[in-house]
Image (cartoon, helix red, strand yellow):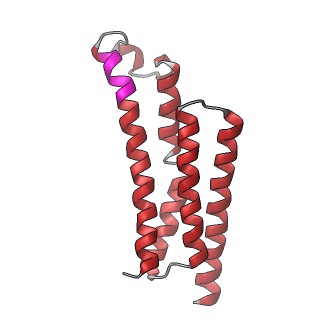
Amino acid sequence: MSGFEKLLLLTVFAQVGLTLAVLLYLGKLRVPPVLAGDIKVADIALDDGNWPERSQQVSNNFNNQFQLPVLFYAAVMICFAVRYVPGIFLLCAVGFVASRYVHAYIHCTTNRVYRRFIAYVAGLAFLTIGWVDLVIELLIVL
């Protein structure tokens, strides 16, 4: 495995780690009130809207981890399938994952929408540039 492949794999591990960390935080927020009887299971079984606001914020962020990151994972799988990691794509992967951490932090804490949006757009830009580079590298260079 090349150095670029190892670094790319680290970005995947970091993204998966973020997703699991958000899930664990969500569990920390949701399990205690259910066990204490403050929230009845019947009230949340079919409607997520009955959770407290902070829990809903974190839940929304957890759902976000399965939106843009899916395109990131797909691009990474292509890199490993062809055993080639373009340098610009690798830089974009690092930027994308870093932006996801910033986005998650904002979303799960202050939830300042404009700041969260800037982090989202930065991630989208990194992802888009990375995909364009990947397509160019694989269709034209290789």
At 59% across and 30% down in the image, what residue appears? 110
**Residue in front for this viewpoint, 53 or 3:** 3
At 31% across and 10% down in the image, what residue appears? 37
Up-down relation of residue 64 to residue 94 (above or below): above
Q: Can you give x and y, in whole percent of width and height, for residue 126 in the image? A: 64, 61
Q: Is residue 17 left or right of residue 53?
A: left
Up-down relation of residue 31 to residue 101 (above or below): above
Q: Is residue 69 left or right of residue 1?
A: right
**Residue at the outermost top position:** 38
At 59% across and 60% down in the image, what residue appears? 95
Q: What's drawn in magenta, residue-wise?
A: 28-34
At 36% across and 81% down in the image, what residue appears? 1
**Residue in front for this viewpoint, 4 or 40:** 4
Q: Is residue 29 left or right of residue 141?
A: left
Q: Can you give x and y, in whole percent of width and height, for residue 84 in the image? A: 49, 82
Up-down relation of residue 5 to residue 129 (above or below): below
> Does the magenta-highlighted stretch encompass residue 79?
no
